[in-house]
Amino acid sequence: MTNNFSEMIDRRNTNSVKWDVGADELPMWVADMDFRTAPAIVEAIKQKADTGIFGYEEVPDEYFAAVQQWYTNEHNWKPQPCWMRFVTGVVPAISSAVRRLSNVGDNVLIQAPVYNIFYNSIINNGRHILSSDLKNNEGVYEIDWDDLATKMAEPLTTMMILCNPHNPVGKVWQPAELRRIAELAESNHVTVFADEIHGDITDSGHGYTPFAAASDTAANLSVTAVSPQQDV
């Protein structure tokens, strides 16, 4: 089964949030691709629907084994199934992690510009946003390492949300950069939450490195959230 990425699909008037725009407008704001979902996924959904039973179910061991195999084959990282938890999505996972890994009144470090939901997850749980803004160096975003080190060292900074690869700037962090972040986090007793939902959609030849794969230090002080890219 293969995808036809050239197929044009008219999604107007289909209750699509993205395409709820004027006749002469194009939506350019939400990460909602216009490719059909992969045929294998559609077929699996049809097979499940054909049973006609949708009761409470447990996530099978095969699910976690499939995640392990994918990351081993595609990203040279072999997470153990016993490390994994199934959650309803990356966004609720971020909010849960903020509540579990920091305290009310703490600083949670981010790197603006970044996904707006990071802000909501911090503020809505009674924590403070602390941003070490990325530097735009002639169109290439970079980490301000001095600023990051200073803000990591603030006593109330207990957690960092890392976007890897970074949304929206499209930066694929390199292993050396990830290791340096991990070293700073270890020195300052900061836990890193790595949002890696975009790891599978980097350009050819620019594969991403999972934060936990960058070093033992990174693995030991981090939580990683991943998600299937259901539209590609």
Image: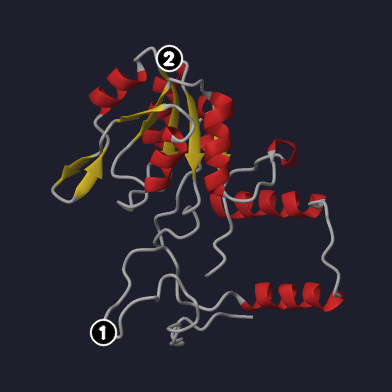
Residue type indicated by callout 1: Asp
Give the camera-side residue of 26 and 148: 26
Quarter of image, res 107? top left
Note whether residue 130 is visible: yes
Q: Is residue 146 above or below residue 16?
A: above
Residue 8 in the figure: left or right of residue 87: left
On the picture, is 60 further left or further right than 99?
Answer: right
Mark sitting earlier along the chain (2/1): 1
Q: Residue at x 41, y 34 (%)?
A: 123
In the depicted structure, whether residue 149 falls above or below residue 219: above
Q: Which mark is residue 192?
A: none
User: What residue do we see at 44% from left, 53% from top?
Assistant: 207
Q: Position of residue 121 (x, y in %)?
A: 46, 38
Q: Secondary structure at mark 2?
A: helix
Q: Disc 2 versus disc 1: distance between alpha carbons? A: 53 Å
Closer to viewer: mark 2 or mark 1 = 1
The residue at the point 45 percent across, 49 percent down is 208
Residue 105, quarter of the rendered image:
top left
Q: Nearer the viewer, residue 142 or 44?
A: 44
* Furthest residue in direction left, as rendered: 138
Q: Residue at x 39, y 75 (%)?
A: 20
Q: Circle 2 is placed at which residue position?
A: 187
| Residue 59 picture location, percent across and down | 78, 52
Image location (x, y in percent) of residue 232: 52, 70
Please name the residue that numbered disc 1 is placed on.
24
* Contact flag, marks 2 and 1 (Cβ < 8 Å): no
